[in-house]
Image (cartoon, rainbow, N blue to C red):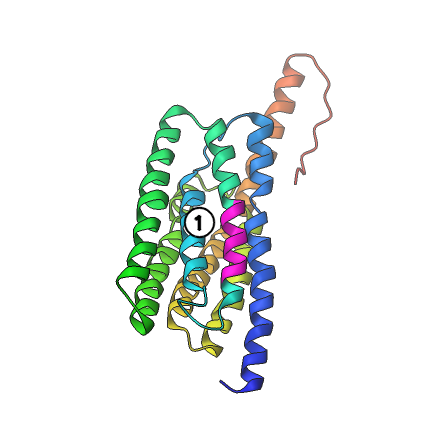
Amino acid sequence: MSGLVHTIQFVFGILGNAASLFLFLVPTYTFKRIIKNKSTEQFSGIPYVMAFFNCLLTAWYGLPFITSNNILVTTINGTGATIELIYVLIFLLYAPNKQKRKMILAIFVLVLVAFAAAAVISVLVFHGKNRELFCGIASTVFSIVMYAAPLSIIRLVITTKSVEYMPFLLSFAAILSCTSWFIYAILGMDPYIGISTGVGLTLGIVQLILYFCYCDKKILNKKTFAVEESQQNMDNGHSNDVNLYLP
């Protein structure tokens, strides 16, 4: 890789770190809501478990004894793993018992068993390019699974015709992050990062399209609710100023 290409790749790696950190921090709004209401409502905790697992695998893939010149991949995914673990713990605190059981099972199987097995096998069984191949495939597969996790939310959006449980910032941040890392992968000729972020970019665009298709429905539903509430108050002999243009 020439010096100029390496420099450009490094720049996109820095941009990818910034965009990914933004992506990891976007759900803080969701978790503020969960903590405030002391309920996980219809939010799913599985995507955060998947994100935690994926961050561990990708951070492992970026280590110098697996691949070269990918330390930026390790730093941001190590940070992401810490953030996602905090989200998972908060979710476990407020989730119903049924959801807790599913998440605990997912954490045990994915994190404790699958990641430990992948790490041990990669060190003891594979060497050189074969180790990179094994870790790259594992990271790619579970990155795609992580990016596909919001498909359940996409189904919910289509069913309810509401984007309440698919925050705009999350989809937008995913596109920024995947775009930066996709270019980083192309410049570094890394097919593993390129394939996973390419899939993530595609699904992010789909979510953004759905958001713009159904965001007006959310506003319309709020207006309708406000009108009905106002009419009910008038019928009951009460006066109440209702803002019909809620955001």
> At which x and y percent is residue 75?
54, 59
> At which x and y percent is residue 32?
60, 35
Residue 102 falls in image quadrant? top left
- The local crowd at label 1, few if under 14, some if 14 to 19, many if 20 or more residues have their Cα within 10 Å, is many
Taking depth in this image into account, of 189 and 30 the one nearest to the observer is: 189
Q: Residue beneath label 1, please? A: 51
48 left or right of 219 in image: left
Q: Number of callouts in the render?
A: 1
Q: Is residue 15 above or below residue 101?
A: below
Residue at the front extreme? 124
> At which x and y percent is residue 243?
70, 32
Taking depth in this image into account, of 31 and 157 the one nearest to the observer is: 31
Residue at the top extreme? 237
Badge 1 element: helix
Residues shaded magenta: 74-83
Q: Is residue 119 magenta?
A: no
> At which x and y percent is residue 193?
42, 67
Q: Is residue 55 above or below residue 155?
A: below
87 left or right of 117 in image: right
Q: Quadrant of the C terminus?
A: top right
Residue 90, visible in the rendered structure: yes
